Amino acid sequence: MKKINLAAMLLILTAFTSAVYADIALQSKEEVEGTWKLDHTKNSLTDKESIERPDTWVFKDGKLTILNIAREGKFYDQPPVNYEIDNGKLKISLVGSSRSDVFSLVEKDDKSMTLKGKFGGYYYFVKK
């Protein structure tokens, strides 16, 4: 009997936890437009270690430009790529490829935004 109660409690807790972190469907490009400083990334929501990032993402007129990307002790800017909203998710073209990265919106307000990559990484932005 105790095992059944424990299993039921775990099932309820799991359902509640996934509901709290449910993705938010994006409706239009305007929801992400603007200049966003990528503050840090994490591999998962529960990951205690975060990676500080110097990047700035500029969403404007259907184009994304990523500025100040760190690489081997230097910084560079990525050329603009297209982005769109597809089935409630942010779809960003990859430079020099026909493929795209897909991000889900986890949380957003006037000053911050959190995106989740298709492989589970979390991107924490602050509005500039």
Image (cartoon, grey):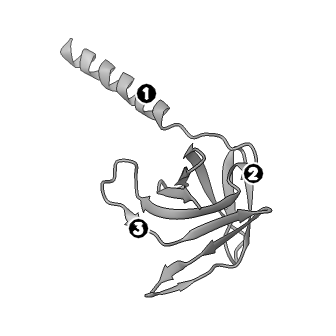
Count residues near mark 1 (Cα–Cα under 10 Å), then give few for <14, some for 14-19, many for 20+.
few
Who comes first in sequence, dot 2 or dot 3?
2
Extreme top residue here? 1
Extreme right residue here? 61
In which quadrant will I find the N terminus? top left
How far across and how far down the image is residue 10, in percent? 31, 26
In which quadrant will I find the C terminus? bottom right
Who comes first in sequence, dot 3 or dot 1?
1
| Mark 2 or 1, closer to the camera | 2
Residue 59 sits in quarter:
bottom right
Q: Which residue is mark 3?
A: 52
Residue at screen point 40% across, 48% down: 45
Q: Amino acid at mark 2?
A: Glu
Residue at screen point 62% across, 81% down: 77
Q: Amino acid at mark 3?
A: Glu
Residue at screen point 78% across, 62% down: 62
How far across and how far down the image is residue 39, in percent? 47, 63
Q: Secondary structure at mark 3?
A: strand
How far across and how far down the image is residue 51, in percent? 39, 66
Count residues near mark 2 (Cα–Cα under 10 Å), then give few for <14, some for 14-19, many for 20+.
few
The residues bearing labels 2 and 1 have C-alpha atoms spaced at a distance of 31 Å
Count residues near mark 3 (Cα–Cα under 10 Å), then give few for <14, some for 14-19, many for 20+.
few
What is the number of the mark on residue 15? 1
Q: Secondary structure at mark 2?
A: helix
Q: Which residue is mark 2?
A: 30
Q: Is residue 111 above or below residue 15?
A: below
Q: Amino acid at mark 1?
A: Ala
Q: Secondary structure at mark 1?
A: helix
Q: Nearer the viewer, residue 125 or 44?
A: 125
